[in-house]
Amino acid sequence: MALSDDIALLSKVPLFAGLSDDKLRLMAFGAERRRLVEGQTLFREGTSADCGFVVAEGAFQLASTRRDGSTRDEGVAGEGTLLSELAMISAVERKYTAIALEDSEVIRINRPLFRRMLEEYPDVAILVDARIRENLAAMIGEMKGLAGRFA
């Protein structure tokens, strides 16, 4: 894919929506593409995460392990999905395993690249901070709704 295709894809990712083409171009230029064949593991639950991935083509099955050792289906990530967004900011562990459902391609955004974007462009840092807060608030709201079902 061309750099312009990567820029267009990144602009559709909710975390990056609203960033200028110049900033998206810098991110796309510094990122790397990775191809995976059907059945190949992108990453495993519990491993150290040092980057996020944007699904450029294909799809990934997401699964986590329950306390009893059984597997829990976490859904499917398709084109434009950002996986492990917090890993671009901080050292975290992967919360699930991602396996390619078909031949797929991802854009890998490593932590140093993303941190450089945040340091050089304070407006990006403010935007990302607001989006992460919104995501956390939505997740907490969902958890509160689930808590009511178990009370």
Image (cartoon, rainbow, N blue to C red):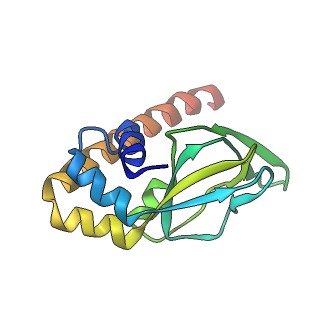
State the image coordinates of residue 12 (x, y, percent, origin top left).
39, 36
Residue placed most toward the observer, 88 or 151: 88
Residue placed most toward the observer, 91 or 140: 91
Tell me where residue 140 sits by quadrant: top left
Query: Residue shown at 44%/58% (left/top)?
Result: 86
Left or right: 133, with 38 as reference point: left
Query: Residue shown at 34%/47% (left/top)?
Result: 132
State the image coordinates of residue 39 (x, y, percent, origin top left).
81, 52
Residue placed most toward the observer, 92 or 49: 49
Residue placed most toward the observer, 18 or 134: 18
Query: Residue shown at 33%/39% (left/top)?
Result: 134
Residue found at the far front of this picture: 2
Left or right: 138, with 84 as reference point: left
Left or right: 51, with 38 as reference point: left
State the image coordinates of residue 106 (x, y, percent, origin top left).
56, 53
Left or right: 69, with 42 as reference point: right
In this rendering, the count of numbered labels is 0
Classify 121 as above or below 139.
Answer: below
Query: Residue shown at 32%/45% (left/top)?
Result: 16
Tell me where residue 21 sits by quadrant: top left
State the image coordinates of residue 55 (x, y, percent, origin top left).
55, 46
Give the position of the C terminus as an image quadrant. top right
